[in-house]
Image (cartoon, helix red, strand yellow):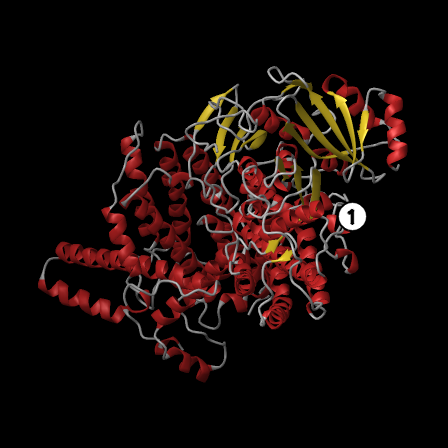
Amino acid sequence: MLLKIFDFSTITAAFHLWLSGKMSSVLVMLIEMTIAGMCALGLFVFLGLVLVYMERKVSAVMQIRIGPNRVGPWGTIQAVADTVKLLLKEGLTPDGADKFLFNFAPILVIIVSMLILAPIGFGKGLVIWDLNIGVLYISAVSSIGVIGILMAGWASNNKYSLIGAMRSGAQIVSYELSVGLSLISVVILTGSLQMSDIVNSQANGWWIFKGHIPIIISFIIFVIASTAETNRAPFDMAEAESELTGGFHTEYAGMKFAMFFLAEYINIFIVCAIGATLFLGGWMPFHIGGLTAFNDIMDYIPSPFWFFGKTFFLIFVIMWFRWTFPRLRVDQLLTLEWKYLLPISMVNTLLVTLMAIMGWYF
Amino acid sequence: MELENATEEQDDLIINVGPQHPSTHGVLHIKLKVNGETITDVEPHLGYIHRSIEKMCESHTYRQFIYTTSRMDYLSAHINNQACALAVEKGLQVEVPARAKAIRILMAELTRLASHQLWWGCTGLDLGAVTPFFHAFREREMINDIMEKTCGARLTMNYAVPGGVMADLHPDFVKDVKAFLAEFKGKFHEYDELLTGNIIFEERVKGIGYISKEDAISFGCTGPVARASGVSCDIRKLHPYDGYENLQFEEIIRTEGDCYGRYLARMDEMKQSMYIIEQLIDNIPDGDYQAKTKALIKLPKGEFYQRVETARGEFGVYIVSEGATTPYRIKFRSPGFSNLSALKHMVVGGKIADLVAVMAMLDLVIPDIDR
Amino acid sequence: MNNEELKSAILAIQPAATFDESGEFLNVHISSELLLPLMLELRNNKDFYFDYLFCETCIDWKDHLMMVYHLTSKSLKHTLVVKGKISNRDNAEIESVAGIWKTAEFMEREVYELFGVKFLNHPDLRKLILDDYWTGYPLRKDYSDPVNLIEY
């Protein structure tokens, strides 16, 4: 069944073999790391541009407008123009700000986003580092991002930034619990933390269909909690409460602000990618267990298409939320997590365990 | 957006909200004292758009001063003009023809609808939902176009004059209004779907900014703000003018007293306005559109007070005349002024985010308050 | 209560009041010193129960100032206009009614800055609309501002 899906590891293995024939293994490793790094950076930049453009067009369609349509065909080069503008802006450091932390905070946030790209499988065999504790790695590294936000708020030497940063921090830390528990429910059913194992286990159907009700609950909680994790509306009180200031990134201008902005969009991509991998099958085409002919037809569509299609669908849903709902107040936000989502997640995890033990899933 | 921080008295932080706001309320500067997240004191600072209209009107003739009133509460501009025209007519004891009265009511109800549509869009915007703004303005553009064809202006109509209206209706008026009504009725359910039933929205406004009936009367609140607390204060019902006594419509009184009640009161008022327009649009009487009055009007010596119901509440024009061609003193009783004085009572003890919700539901227009 | 009953009831409380029925509402003229007891009675007495002050302003009659209060009762549905005459223009003072009707707080601040009438026992008497450094009382008839005001 899986033989029909084109395996990119054949290409990478062949390349590795050819390179090892030419030079020593250390050099080979260095070259491969550089290539992987460049690809990741390229993906980063490309995604940033695409997501900014997508957000503006999606919001325009929902508001019966046109959106950017002047710069380039259908406004596609708009994001490039915005980047150039941000680059040319004066990067002001406020008086009395902690210079090292002030400059390091956006870099830390970008580093965290890039690190999480590592275990995600973009296609069959297209993984940077398929480590055996993939899900745990993602959960752990994304927690470091909170430090970047708190650093930014503290180093700005602005009381209002600090309040905004602490609110943001509290929000992210709370919702990490729900995200973690919903990820665990899929891990329980799969029996492995490795991302490629999770994807392979969905060869006879995606977990959202195989795991029926408890996994659907997990998925819904995952989508809500990750919208809150990335500070997107309707949970963006910390930055918009003040359409006043910008929360923790008030004092940032120019390229440093661009880094926060970019990191936010990459975070959205990453959480949607994780959701797509764990619940919707990642690069696995839409299979129905037992219908081999149907599955073979589905396999002809290359795996990166499946992956990006699912991820962008989830990104669209998250953008849809932003332009539809009003904002939650800060205390209502935290009430939602601690009084509603967390107990439901915990009960759901028990249900999933019961389901796994009894084998009540497809 | 300017922002200053200072600490005073232990834990109270002073935050300046305004004068430039992201929302279209106008230039209002509010000094907030917060203790953590809870508001302890609210102090509005007015005067950023004070144009001394009352003093100016003392040197304008009775035909000229009406134009300044459009600039006060610019969202109910026609209703303000109507009030001034009625006050002058009261002094002159002139009989306004039936056609002029019907036209004035039609324009007033269209203005009320337009004002409530803008209010609804901006409420969504203040609370974080950006899209309702576009829905509201899509319909409001239709009303603006109708106004432009007949009155010549989209916002500051200057259409009502002492004696009637300035010009007759445009030939397309009846057709356009009927088309607008049909379209708006079809789209009204979208308004409810987007905000009214939304649980996030309800959590933001239910129970927020409560004011009791006695306090509402004592603070002088009028309009939907007071009607949501159970006070019966619709001037169109209590002291009818211009033919409202012959029309059938309900006064919307609710008992919740909080922001959600005010929201629902305004939504129901929109439906009542549509109902009034439907009653009149096919029955506009024929005849003159303006009664004959002198070019230079001289009101007899005395005092004349006229009250009307604008979209915000009770608007009063108090003219003191000494028999000259210009008034001796004019006082405009603006609804926003009294509604704003109740802000502190409604908001103290709540969170900072509640301030935004309360101000959105009070529907303040600052030029109306500052005059 | 109709106008006759109002007149007799008010005369019973305050014999010094005079009446003027030439306009739309019943006007009660009284001097500024005797104002507050009458206002308290108008608000609290259940026969009057004037709970709604819908307009409070001042008129400058060149030799005296006249405070005008438009009152109405929501339950009993009668309307009254009380006019308090302030004879001393240079040192205009009158008791504040902000303790009786809360709407008077803002209205009296506005009259204070535009006419110069000092309200005794007002909870927070300072300028509302004009800038803090403004001198003079703009709405008085003898206000002159050679820079901004054109006199003809």
Near-viewer residue (A258 or B106): B106
Q: Residues within 10 Å of mark 1 (few under 14, many from 20)?
A: few
Image side of residue A117 versus residue A292, left or right: left
Near-viewer residue (B292 or B286): B292
Residue situated furthest left in the rendering = A22
Relative vertical location of residue B69 with respect to residue B242 in this rendering, above or below: above
Image side of residue B186 versus residue A281, left or right: right
Residue A344 shows in this picture: no
Residue at the image point whose x is 47% and y is 58% from the top: A318
Assign a secondary structure to mark 1: helix
Q: Quadrant of residue C38?
A: top right
Image side of residue A233 versus residue C18, left or right: left
The residue carrying mark 1 is B238
Where's residue A196, x and y in %? 38, 63
The quarter of the image holding the N terminus of chain B is top left
Q: Quadrant of residue A99?
A: top left
Residue at the image point whose x is 51% and y is 37% from the top: B28
The quarter of the image holding the C terminus of chain B is top right
Name the kind of residue labelled 1 in the image. Leu
Where's residue B223, x and y in %? 69, 46
Residue situated furthest bottom in the rendering = A293
Residue B125 shows in this picture: yes
Near-viewer residue (A4 or A345): A345
Where's residue A356, x and y in %? 56, 61
Near-viewer residue (A51 or C124): C124
Where's residue B20, x and y in %? 45, 40
Q: Chain of mark 1?
A: B
Number of labelled discs?
1
